[in-house]
Image (tube, helix red, strand yellow):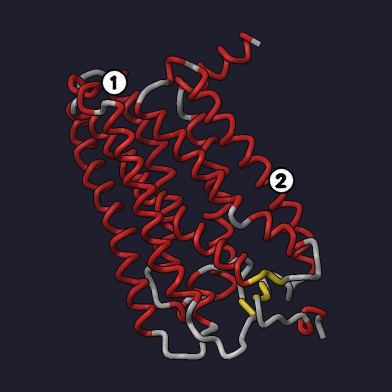
Amino acid sequence: MHTLAFITSPEGFILLGFSNRPKLEQILFMFVLIFYLVTLVGNAVIILVSRLDPSLHTPMYFFLTNLSFLDLCFTTSSIPQLLFNLGSPDKTVSYVGCALQLFMFLGLGGTECVLLAVMAYDRFTAVCKPLHYSVLMHPQLCWKLVSVAWGVGLLNSLVMSPVTMKLPRCGRCRVKHFLCEMPALIKIACVDTVAVESTVFILSVIIVLVPLSLILISYSYIALAVLRMKSAAGRRKAFNTCGSHLTVVSLFYGNIIYMYMQPGNNSSQDQGKFLTLFYNLVTPMLNPVIYTLRNKDVKGALRRLVSRK
């Protein structure tokens, strides 16, 4: 019998994760560690470049800096715990630790949903109203939009974290996941969870689908504006800046919708774990790569900073 079968704590939870596949755990540890380090370095570079190069002191890079900071927090809220569990037979996490992880995960995930919509509005203004861009996207508005994004994420956490953590579990503490994620915690409840699942679904519609709808509307107008452009250089520039954001949106929202917009019992547990790992680690790692490779401004700023040193 696996050793973790004897690790029980009435005060905490056992994160089973990938413990049924010990060989996979060893491989995952190396991959997760490398991806996490790349994520930290990549997003830190984006933040530093955006702040140190005066040519990048624009609304677009202000929002990108916030996205990179958000991704750093998002991965750090769960990946160190995952690395500890993958490298150790002890899979336990305290009740407080689990609650904190859930709170951060819900808050940061909700913030990113809204922030991506804010970034789409910024691109809409830049492409569709270029002459009024500097007037419309003034610093005060940028700060207000970012504050709204963080506020929505905080509200999401304040509502859903207590509801999830207070569910009676009748001694059940084995979470079939590598982190304290809401669907996995709801599954081990020993009461009818229809009301909670309905609340989750409604909040998911508000926090996930409303920003996504705004993003799609923004890009519909952007597509029409790009088609009307007579300059090939203008079309190429619009495609490059908007293409990076669209790629990030597709990666993030695709996984979130699959995880949260369907009944919890319908998804495969292993599939759910790998999808969570993807949007919690791979997507934040890819964001700096996507924005750097497709963006001449960022590459130019990096070259200037390196040449200075």
* Point 34% across, 38% down: residue: 119
Q: Which of marks 1 and 2 is in front?
A: 2
Quarter assignment of residue 38: top right
Q: What residue type is labelled 1?
A: Gly
Q: Residue 224 carries which label?
A: none
Q: What percent of the width, then of the height, locates residue 153?
A: 39, 54
> Which quadrant is home to the C terminus?
top right
Is residue 47 shown above or below 302? below
Is residue 233 shown above or below 62? above
Identify which residue, 229 or 122, lies in the foreground. 122
Identify which residue, 31 or 61, lies in the foreground. 61
Quarter assignment of residue 83: bottom right
> Which quadrant is home to the N terminus?
bottom right
- Mark 1 lies on residue: 234
- Mark 2 lies on residue: 34
Left or right position of 219 against 173: left
